[in-house]
Amino acid sequence: MNSYTTFSQIYDSVMDNYDYDRVFQWLESLVPEKKKLEILEMAMGTGRLTEKLTKIGKVTGFDYSGDMLALAEERLRGVGVSLFQMDLRTFDLNRNYDCILCLCDGMNYLESEEDLLQSFLNVKKHLKDGGRFIFDMNTHARFLDYGDFTEMREEDDFTLIWENHYDPPVNEYCITMFIRNKDGRYDRYREIHEERAFSRADVEFLLKEAGLNLIEAFDGYTDRKANDETERICYLVENV
C-alpha cells in the first residue's frame, strides 16, 4: 500500500478540480433515507468529504496515512468524527454501519485481487443488513487515457512535477515536490504512488464472493450506467 507523506501537505491544492459538493449531492441520492445514519468512510484523506458527510449522519473515518489523518483531525476538530489509522484490508472497528464509503479511487491502491477481496469481506463484516457500500475505481480506460506524460504545476508555496507511466494494470505516479519552508527556501521531496486497474468483471465477481449484492455500476458520479469507455466506475452495493 502507498502512503501519502509529504504529498499530503499539498494534496488539497493539487485536488482542487475534484468537486466535493457534486460528489456529496450524488451520494445523498443513494444513501438510505434515515434521520441519523451511521457512516464509515474508508481512505478518507484530509477529510474534505467527511466534513460534508456530518450533515447526514454520525461519521467514523480511517486512512492508511498518518500525515493525511493529521490534516483531517485539524479540519474536523469539534465536529464529533471518530478517526483511526487503519488499512483497507485489515480494518476492524467492532461495529456495524448503515453506509460505508470509499471514494476518490482509494480502492485502486490495493495491490491484488486477494487484497480487494479481503477489503470487501471486511466491508461485509462492518455493514448492517440492508446497508449500502459505495465506492469508485479508476479504470483501464482512464489510465490508458493518461498514458505517459510529465506535467509541472507552480504555485506560491510549491512546485510539483508529476510523471505518469502506465504499464497495465499498474499506473505509476512519480511526484517530485519543491516546497517552501519557513526560511523561504525550497525543500525537495519525491514520492512514488501506484494505482491498479481492476476489470469490472473481476470487481463484480469478488463482490459476489464476499457476499455483497451489486445494485448498479455508474459512469462516474451520475445516474448513467457504466460502459466500456467509463473512466471512473462508481459501484452501489448492498449487504443482503
Image: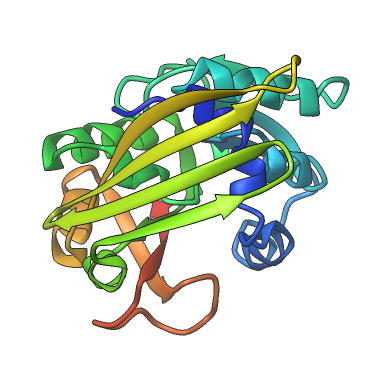
Location of residue 111 with respect to 138 vertically, above or below:
above
Q: Position of residue 134 (x, y in %)?
A: 47, 54
Q: Residue at x 11, y 57 (%)?
A: 168
Q: Position of residue 105 (x, y in %)?
A: 41, 50
Tell me if I can see residue 154 in this picture. Answer: yes
Direction right: furthest residue: 78
Tell me if I can see residue 125 in this picture. Answer: no
Q: Residue at x 60, y 21 (%)?
A: 69
Q: Residue at x 59, y 64 (%)?
A: 30
Colour scheme employed for the rendering of this structure: rainbow
Q: Residue at x 44, y 30 (%)?
A: 126
Location of residue 166 with respect to 45 vertically, above or below:
below
Q: Position of residue 122 (x, y in %)?
A: 33, 30
Q: Position of residue 76 (x, y in %)?
A: 79, 27
Residue 80 horizontal side relative to residue 175, left or right: right
Residue 109 horizontal side relative to residue 23, left or right: left
Residue 44 horizontal side relative to residue 215, left or right: right
Which one is in front, 185 or 182?
185
Q: Which of the 4 image quadrants contains residue 159?
A: top right
Location of residue 36 with respect to 236 vertically, above or below:
above
Q: Quadrant of the N terminus?
A: top left
Task: Count the numbered circles shown.
Answer: 0
Location of residue 221 with respect to 195 vertically, above or below:
below
